[in-house]
Image (cartoon, rainbow, N blue to C red):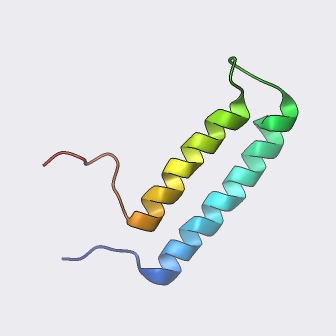
Amino acid sequence: MDRRPGCLGGLLRLTLISAAYNWLQSTFGYRRGGCIGIGCGTILLFVFIILVCGTCTNTDWFRLGF
């Protein structure tokens, strides 16, 4: 069975990811200073890029095996 979320489900996920990203960036991000050398803002950016790519391509990163 095809378990894709559809257009509205994907848009809702992207909206929630965007809201979480904005909140975390304002709380821990670039304006607050670094946390382990490369900065929390950069770490958050990479994590949320992976989440957005996973939402757009419907990739389950935890089931990459056969």
Q: Quadrant of the N terminus?
A: bottom left
Q: What residue do we see at 40% from left, 75% from top?
A: 5
Which residue sits furthest right? 31
Quick check: 66 left or right of 12? left
Q: What residue do we see at 43% from left, 57% from top?
A: 54
Residue 17, image x, y percentages: 61, 58
Relative vertical location of residue 8 with respect to residue 38 in this rendering, above or below = below
Relative vertical location of residue 37 with respect to residue 15 in this rendering, above or below = above
Residue 65, image x, y percentages: 18, 45
Which residue sits furthest top? 37
Which residue sits furthest left? 66
| Figure label count | 0
Q: Give the image quarter of residue 39.
A: top right
Q: Give the image quarter of residue 27.
A: top right
> In this view of the protein, which residue sits in the foreground, 9 or 38?
38
Q: What residue do we see at 53% from left, 58% from top?
A: 52
Quick check: 58 left or right of 29? left
Q: What residue do we see at 85% from left, 31% from top?
A: 32
